[in-house]
Image (tube, grey):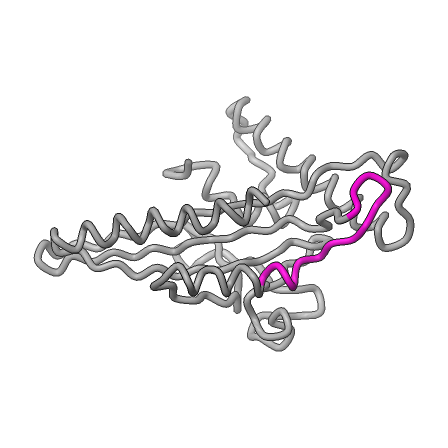
Amino acid sequence: GEMRGMIPRSIEKVLEQASRLKQQGWQYVLRVSFLEIYNETIRDLLGNNNNNNSKGQKAGGLEIKLSKSRDNVEVVGLTKVEVKSMEAVADLIVQANKARSVAATKMNIQSSRSHSVFTMYLTGTNKKQGLEATGQLHLCDLAGSERLSRSQVTGDRLKETQAINKSLSCLSDVFFNIAQKSPHIPYRNSKLTYLLQNCFGKDGK
């Protein structure tokens, strides 16, 4: 799919550029994480057994918390893996895809039942110049909105669809309030918008 192609291509560009900048004295470390938001629960797709026993993991999934500096959000206990080659990336994607929540509905034979967020964490240091730079890139694969009357889902599938539709509505609300320059942006109305809130303001793009 498109998302499986996007991740390798993005990492390849980052690794290529990091290699070029070595000539200018820069050293880069690239780490990645992969999570899904399923029924408003955050699941680690790279952890052992989806990180069920990891620090920060509760029955309701991993928790999002503000950093100590209160200028960034972080997922407590989320697995971050250092990546040095494209081969390692392929293995991580296979591992994550096996853990994704999918199911069949009347509209889609293999409908994604969650949003997934693949994040790259890049740290660069230049000892000669005494500089350090950090950045994050989020690649999001959002589950599509479904009309309940058409998808004909019941039980667990119904609950999943309602959670997907609600989170997409919250995302739309965030965009609307930003466009209106509202003094309050409702980031915390969903896990998706809370997790990505730094992308919507300050230096985010």
Please tell me whether residue 205 belongs to the stretch shown in magenta. Answer: no
On screen, residue 52 above or below 44: below
The residue under the point 19% across, 50% down is 20
The structure residue drawn at horizontal position 64% and vertical position 74%, both measured from the top left corner, is: 49
Q: Is residue 149 left or right of residue 75?
A: right
- The image quadrant that residue 42 belongs to is bottom right
Kindly identify the residue that appears in the image at 52 percent across and 30 percent down: 183
Front in this rendered view, residue 186 or 155: 155
Q: Residue 23 vs residue 44: left or right?
A: left
Q: Is residue 6 above or below residue 59?
A: above
Q: Is residue 195 left or right of residue 201?
A: right
Quadrant where the N terminus sits is top right
Residue 173: name its quadrant: top right
Q: Nearer the viewer, residue 143 or 136?
A: 143
Give x and y (percent) for residue 73: 48, 53
Left or right of 173? Residue 108 is right
Q: Residue at x 34, y 46 (%)?
A: 13
In front of the other: 199 or 79:
79
Choose top left, top right, bottom left or bottom right for residue 2. top right
| Extreme-bottom residue of the structure | 53
* Residue 205: x %, y % from top left: 42, 36
Q: Position of residue 16 (x, y in %)?
A: 28, 50
Residue 37 position within the rendered picture, expressed as x and y whole percent measured from the top left:
65, 53
**Residue most toward the left?**
128
Residue nearest the viewer, comparing 14 with 76: 14
Q: Which portion, as a residue range, is magenta?
A: 96-109
Vertical position of residue 132 compared to residue 205: above or below: below
